[in-house]
Amino acid sequence: MENKDLGTTSTGIKPNAAGLLCYLLGWVTGLIFFLIEKDNKFVRFHAMQSMVVFGGLTVLNIVLSMILSLFRIYMELFFVFQLVGLAAVALWIILMIKAYQGEKFKLPIAGDIAETA
């Protein structure tokens, strides 16, 4: 792994480790790092992307749960839950690895939103 200069953080944590931690507990740690990190653009990008991606997945999970309970469509939506959950875990792992490697891995829609913040 190549040693990239990602600057310094106001938290004292190495930027690549802070980037990984932004994804650790989904949107919660993204929000925490977005609020406490004022200087480092790399960490702030990963924090915002974490909030957008995993906040969106949380909302999707809540909406699917409400539809499931309202319309009692169990088997069809159970399969959708499984797919969304599997995709979320895979994405979670990929994003943590890329952040730790010092890479600004930008997802199509969430990355654009994260860059503007």
Image (cartoon, helix red, strand yellow):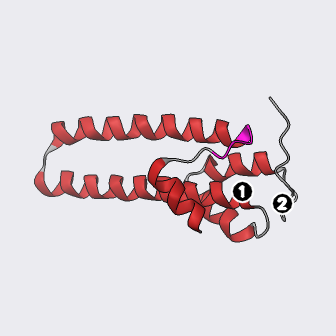
- In the foreground, 81 or 52: 52
Q: Which residue is mark 2?
A: 9
Query: Residue 41 at what x, y percent from top left?
Result: 73, 61
Please determine whether, in this image, residue 103 is positioned above or below residue 18. Answer: above
Q: Is residue 108 left or right of residue 1?
A: left
Q: At 88% across and 58% down in the image, what residue appears? A: 12
Query: Residue 8 at what x, y percent from top left?
Result: 87, 57
Q: Is residue 5 left or right of residue 35?
A: right
Q: At 73% across and 40% down in the image, what residue appears? A: 100
Specify the quadrant that holds the N terminus. top right
In this orientation, does residue 27 appear?
Answer: no
Please determine whether, in this image, residue 94 is positioned above or below residue 14. Answer: above
Q: Are marks 1 and 2 in contact (CB under 8 Å)?
A: yes
In this orientation, does residue 76 appear?
Answer: yes
Q: Is residue 94 left or right of residue 70?
A: right
Q: Which residue is mark 1?
A: 43
Q: Is residue 61 magenta?
A: no
Q: Quadrant of residue 43?
A: bottom right
Q: Secondary structure at mark 1?
A: helix
Disc 2 marks a residue whose amino acid type is Thr
Specify the quadrant that holds the C terminus. bottom right
Ranked by sequence position, the earlier of labels 1 and 2 is 2
**Furthest-top residue in view?**
1
Disc 1 marks a residue whose amino acid type is Val
Q: Main secondary structure of the magenta part?
A: loop
Residue range in magenta is 100-104
Would you call the spot at circle 1 few (<14 residues within 10 Å), some (14-19), or many (20 or more)?
Answer: many
